[in-house]
Image: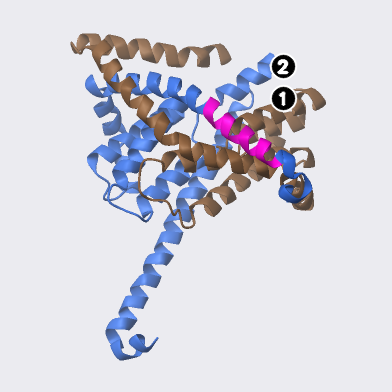
Chain colours: A brown, B blue
Amino acid sequence: MLKFSQYIIPILVVILLIISLFKRNKAFDSFASGAKEGLNLAIGVFPFLAAVFVCVTLFKVSGLAAYLTTICKPLFEFLGVPVELAELIMIKPFSGSGTLVELENIYEQYGVDSYISRCASVVLGSSETVFYISAVYFSKCNVKNLSYGIPLALFITFLGAVFSCFVCRFM
Amino acid sequence: MICLQEPDSAVGFMLNGTSEAVRLTIKLTAIYSLWTGILQIMSDSGVEKTISKVFAPITKRLFKGASKEAQSSIAMNFTANFLGMGGAATAMGINAISQMGEKKTNIDRNMMMFFIINVSSIQLLPTTVIALRSSYGSKTSSDIILPSLVASIFTTLIGVVLVLVIEKIKDKWKFRHSDYQIRHPERSRKI
C-alpha cells in the first residue's frame, strides 16, 4: 500500500503531461506562466507566516503550552485520550513540523506499533495545522475577521483527536 | 510572561520565529511554483474543467452562489487534498478564498464552509505519517489508513453540519431582528 501511494502523484503528473500533449497544449509555457504565480503567492503569505510563527514560538518557550497541557490532562483522561498524547494534540494546531518531532519522540519512547503510537499517527493523519491554514488561505483577500471560524476549527480538531483515539481501540 | 522572566532572550525567541518563517517561505516558494506550474498545465489542457464538473454536484450544494471560477478552484483544492498534494491544495485554496471574497471584508457562509472543510482534513492517504512509521521499522505501517480515513470523514461531516446549523441560527436571528424593526419601528429606534 505504501509503495503504491508513493507512485500516485508522479504517475498523475505523467498522465497530465500526456493529456496536455494530446490536446496540443504547450506544457512548458503553461508551466512557466503558472510558476510565476507561485512566487507571488509565497510573498503574499510571508507576512502572515512571520506573525503566526512569532506567536507560536512565544507560546511554546514561555511555558504557556506546557501549562495548558497540564491543565487539560484530566480532561483528556476523562475523554479516553492517552495522556501521553496531550502535548501532541496541543501543538498540532500551531505547527506541523513541531508535531512531527513530537511524533518521532513518541515512536521512540513507546515503540511504533504500540497503541499510543498508533493513536498519535491517526490523530496526525486526520487533522490539519489550523493556524497555518487560516493565515495562509486568507492572505490574499480582505477578510481579516474570521468570526467564529477559529474556535470552531479548534473544536473540530479536538473532537477529531478524541474520535481518533476512540477508533484506534477497535481498528 | 517571558518578558518578565528572561527579558534578554525574548527578542531572540521572536527572531527564531521570524527566521523560521523565512525558511518556510523559501521552501514554500519552491513548492508553490512547482504546483502552480502544474496547475496551470491542468487548466490549460482542460483537466481542471473535467475535475470541476465531477465535483459540481457537491460544490453547487455546499457553496451556493459561488462563482464558476471559485467552484472550480474549490474542486481542484479538494482533489489536491484527497491526494495529499499539500502545496497544490494551499495554492488552490488561496485562489478559491480570494475568488469568493473579492469585494468582501467579512467572512461569509461559503468561505467559512471552505475553511472548515480544509481544516478538518480530507486527505485519503496520510503519506507523511505512513512514511515516518515505516522508517521507524513498523511492521504494519499502513494500518492507520482506515482509522485516519474514518476520523477524517467524521470530523468533516461534523464541521459541515456545525457550519450549516450556526449559519441557520444566525439567519434566523437576523430575520427576527429585521421583522421586529418593521413591526415596531418606533420601539426599535429607542433600543
User: A152 above or below A34?
Assistant: below
Return the residue nearer the eye: A68 or A112. A68
Q: Is residue B22 magenta?
A: yes
What main secondary structure does the magenta stretch of the protein show?
A: helix
- Chain ID, mark 2: B
Provide the secondary structure element on which disc 2 rests.
loop
Q: Is residue B98 magenta?
A: no
For mark 2, what is the residue? B136
Q: Marks 2 and 1: in contact by CB < 8 Å?
A: yes
Q: Residue at x 30, y 28 (%)?
A: B51
Residue B97: x and y, percent? 36, 42
The amino acid at mark 1 is Glu
* Badge 1 density bin: few <14, some 14–19, many ≥20, Cα 10 Å: some
Q: Quadrant of residue B87?
A: top left
User: B165 above or below A21?
Assistant: below
The numbered dot on residue B70 is: none
Q: Marks 1 and 2, how far apart in space?
A: 9 Å
Residue B148: x and y, percent? 59, 33
Residue B26: x and y, percent? 48, 23
Q: Are marks 1 and 2 on the same chain?
A: no
Q: Give left or right: position of A70 versus B106.
A: right
For mark 1, what is the residue? A104
The amino acid at mark 2 is Tyr
Q: Residue at x 74, y 38 (%)?
A: A85
Provide the secondary structure element on which disc 1 rests.
helix
**Looking at this rendering, what residue extends furthest in the right direction?**
A109
Residue B58 at least partly seen: no
User: B4 above or below B166?
Assistant: above
Q: Quadrant of residue B80?
A: top left
Chain part drawn in magenta: B10-23
Residue A164: x and y, percent? 64, 39
